[in-house]
Image: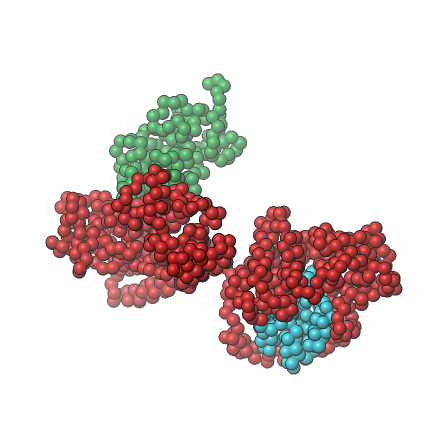
Chain colours: A red, B cyan, C green
Amino acid sequence: MGEISNPGLQQDGFDLTQFYGVFFEEARENLANMESLLLDIDVARPSNEELNAIFRVAHSIKGGAATFGFADVASLTHELETLLDRLRRNELALKRSMVDLLLEAGDVVKAQLACYQSGTDERPPVDALIERIRKMASGQDAAPGGPSAARSLRVTIGPLKSGEAADGLAELFRDIPTLGSIEALDDGVLASDGLRRFKVTTASPDSELLELFSFHVAREQVCIESFGAASAAPAASAKAPAAAAQHPDPEAAPARTTEGDGYGFFVDPKTLAAQTAARAAAADAEAAHRSETRGRADKAAGGALESTTLRVDVEKVDQLINLVGELVITQAMLSQQAKDLDAVQFSALLGGITDLERNSRHLQETVMSIRMIPMAFVFNRFPRLIRDLASRLDKQIELRLVGEATEMDKGLIEKIVDPLTHLVRNSADHGIETPARRQAAGKTPHGTITLSAAHQGGSILIEVRDDGQGLRRERILDKARERGLAVRDDMSDAEVWALIWEPGFSTADQVSDVSGRGVGMDVVRRNITALNGTVELDSAEGYGTRVTVRLPLTLAIMDGMSIGVGGETYILPLASVVESFQVMPGMVQSVGATGRVVKVRDEFLPVVALDDIFNVPRQDGERGPEIMMIVEAEGRRVAALVDELLGQHQVVVKNLETNYRRVPDISGATILGDGRVALIVDTAGLVKRARH
Amino acid sequence: MQSILAVDDSASMRQMVSFTLKGAGYHVIEAADGQEAYEKAMTQSVDLVLTDQNMPRMDGVTLVKNLRGLPAYLSTPILILTTESSDEMKSKGRAAGATGWLVKPFDPSKLLEVIRKVIR
Amino acid sequence: MGMMERMEVRTGAATAAGVSEFLTFKLGGEEYGIDILKVQEIRCYEAVTRIANAPAFIKGVVNLRGVIVPIVDLRVKFALGEARYDTFTVVIILNVAGRVVGAVVDSVSDVMELGEGHVKPAPEFNSLLDAGYIMGLGTVQSGEGERLLILVDIERLMSSPDMGLLERAAA
C-alpha cells in the first residue's frame, strides 16, 4: 500500500481532484450535523444512537480525507474517532468537557478543510489539540489503561518496493512530539529482503503506533517487537511481518487463503471467478423476466426510500427564474393583444390564452419557490453561538427559535446573517444580565433570547427579543449629550431608542470583545436598508428589548394593481392594497396647512396624492383623481389618491438600479403588456411620507 | 457488462468508486447505507458487492449477512471496505459470509486490481 | 504641423496597430466621436416612461428587450436649443461603467477609423464639455475638406456625478 499522495497529485493516472468538491461539501454537512448532535446531546444520559451518529461523522470524514490525501485532517479525525469509539462502546463516560473539546475539534477540522479549499499552504496548528483529545480518550482520570512508561521497540516495515515509503514514519514522530522517538537502524536504506528497520522509543501502546503507522504503510507490513528480543521473523521470511503485526487479539487469527497488499480473501478467488461466470450464464437467460419484476419492485420501493434531493447550481436556478420572468412578460403581452378579439370568432385562441395564463402562474409560483429556503438555515448557527457566548460571559442564556420553517429568498438569507448575528450578540452581551443580577431583580437566573420569523403581507418579519435589562433611557440620553447629539428631556421613548442608530454610539460599560463598540448598530441598519428593509427598536427598562427587522420578500414576480395617474401608469403591489373606493365630495378633509385626511369607517387616514408625489403633469380641464386606494405597509395605512384603476395582473419586477439608481418612492419597474415600462410604487415609502 | 453494487455513506467515496469502476467498463449501482443496498439487491442482481462497514441504518457486516440470506446472493462475491484490518473485523466479516476485504484508504488502481481477481 | 505631444487615445480597439474606430454623431452643430466598443446599438426615441423628480435631462426609462435602460438627452443636458422628439430622433445605447444607458443626440453619422497620426490634443476653448472628458481632436478627410471630430471619453462623461446616472457612494 503506497503512501497517501499529496492532495492533487494523480494516483496512477486517476485524477481525484474532481471529487474534492463533493467531499468538501459532504464534510461540511457532516461537521454541521456533528455540531448539532453535540449541542443537543444529554451529557448525563447520551443515547447510543447519537454517539454512533457522531462517531460515523468522524469516521466518514477520516475515510474521505485519507483517500483524497488530506493527511492532517485524517490524523485529527482519527483521534476524534478513537475517542468517539470508546464513547460509543461505553468504555468512557461522556463529560461536558468532552463535548466542548469535540466542538472545538470540529471547528479546527472546518478550518483545515477551509485551508485546502482556498488553496493556501497554511494549516491550523493541531498538535496541542490532538494531545488533549488523546488524554481525553485515554480517560485521564481513569486509572487503568493509563499511559505506560517509555519502552524501546524494534519496528520492522515491509516488504516494501521502496525504502521511502517508510520515511513517513519519521515524520509522524516529528509532527507528534509526545509520540516518542524513532531511529532508523538501516541508515535509511532498504535491505535486500525488502524490509526497513527502526528503533522506536515510546510511551504509547502498540495499538496506537499501528494506527498511526497505517497512514503510511499497510498494517500488515508493520512488525513491532521489543527491542533487544531476538529479531525473529523478518530474517526468516518476508511473510512474517504480516503474520506478527496484528493486535494481540484473543479471537483466532483467520486462516487466509490469499492475502496481498491491503486486501485479502476468505475464499479462493479463482474458484470464485469460475462460480461467477457460471452464474452469469444462467442469469442471462432470466434477464428479461427479472427486468420486468425489477421495474415493478422499484416503483414499490421508491415510496419507501427516503426523500431525494438534487444539488443544483444557483446560477442555473437564477437563469430559470429569469426565463420564467420573460415568459410571463410575453404571456401578458399576448393577453393584452387578444383582449379586444371577438370572443366567439376566436374562442379557441382566447381559451388557449386563458390556459396559458394559468400555466404561467403555476410555473412561476413553483420556480420562485425553488429559491426560497427556510429560516432554519440562518437560525441553525445560533445555538452554538449562544452556547459559546454564555460560557464566555458567564451568563445563562436560553435560545428559543420560532418560525424556523418560514421561507425566505436564498439571496436575502445570505445577507441577513451578519446583521442578525450582531443583534443576537448584542442581546447576549448588553441585554441579558448575569444570573446574580437577574435573581436580585426577581427574575429567573437564566435569560431567554427569542428569534422568530414570520410572513406578514408582502414582507418577512424577523424579531430578536430578549428578557434582559432593556434599554436604559437615561444612560442613552447621557451618552447622546456626551457625544454632542441634540436631545431633549421630553423626547419620546421611541425617539430615544432611535439614538442608538447613530454611528459610534455605545452605552456599554466597557467595550467587550463580544459585540465590540456601538459602531455595529448603524452598520446593522445600513445592511438592512440596503435590502430594502427596515429595522426598529422597542424596549422596556428592566423587562427586555425587541428588535424588529422587516424585509420585502424578493419576489421577482408579483401580483400588481395597475393604476392611472394623469395619463401615466403606476403599479401598486397587490399585497399592500387593502381596498379602494370612489371619492365622493366631502369625504376628504383638510388638516393644517397641507395635510388631508379621509375617514374610512372609524379611522382617519392621511391622504397622499400620487400625482403630487410623482409630479405628474396635468392638462387644464383634466378631471382630477377620483379613486382612493387604501394601502398598507409596515403595519400602517395610508389613502392614496389616483385617477383610475386599470387592472390587476402579474408583473415581473425589474430592478431600476441595474442601470440607473434608486428612485425615492419607487421600488422597481416592470414591463407592461404593451412593452412600456411602468414604475412600481414603494408603499413603505408612501406610508412614511404620510407620517410627516 | 458486469454490474457492481457500491455501498458507502460518503457521497465522495461513492463518486470516486463509481467513476473508477465505470471507467473500467462496469455498470455501477450505488447505495448510501446497508438498508438501501439490501432493498436494491432484492430487485436486481449484481456480479459483485462492495460495501463500507460503518454506515447508518445497516452496517456492512449486517448487510453481508442479510445478502447471504437471499438465494440470488448465495455466492455473489462481496468485499468489505474497512479502515480497520483488525482480526476482529476480519473474522466478523468472514463469519458473516464476506468473500474478502479491502483496506481503506485505497487508490483506484488497487480497487480495480482486487476486483479483477474476483470477477472478469 | 510639427512634432506635438501625442495625446494617447485611451479607449478604442486597435483594428490595426494604432488605429481606433469611432462612432460619430452630431450634437449642437458640432461633431463628436466616441469609442465604437462602448456603443451597443442605435435606436429611435419612443415609449419612454418618465421618472418623477428626476432632472430634466433624464427623460426616463425604456424597455430594451426586457432590460430597463435610462435615457439621457444630451441636448437638454447641455442646453443646446430646442430638443425635438420625432421619428428621426436618435438614441445611442451605450455600454459604459457596467451599465446600459441611452443618450439622445441630434443625429448619428458613421463609423470612422482614426489612426494615431490623426488625433491631436484638444485646445481648451470647447465650451460644451469639461476638458477632462475630451480625449482629443480627430481629423477626417471628407470629400474635399476635413471634418473635425471632438473625441469624447463617453464612459467618463456618463459616469460623472452631474450626469446623475450613478448613485453616489454612501457616505
Judge whether residue A137 can be spotted in this image: no
- Point 28% across, 56% down: residue: A635
Horizontal side of A441 relative to A39 (left or right) equals left
Q: Residue furthest left?
A: A586
Q: Position of residue A177 (x, y in %)?
A: 71, 52
- Point 13% across, 46% down: residue: A621
Q: Position of residue A278 (x, y in %)?
A: 71, 78
Q: Position of residue A595 (x, y in %)?
A: 18, 47
- Point 66% across, 59% down: residue: A134
Can you say whether A86 is above or below A566 in the image? below
Question: In the depicted view, which residue is nearer to us: B45 or B95?
Answer: B95
Horizontal side of A256 relative to C91 (left or right) equals right
**Image quarter for residue C166?**
top left
Question: In the depicted view, which residue is nearer to us: A604 or A302?
Answer: A604
Q: Residue furthest top?
A: C2
Question: In the depicted view, which residue is nearer to us: A541 or B8?
Answer: A541
- The image shows a total of numbered marks equal to 0
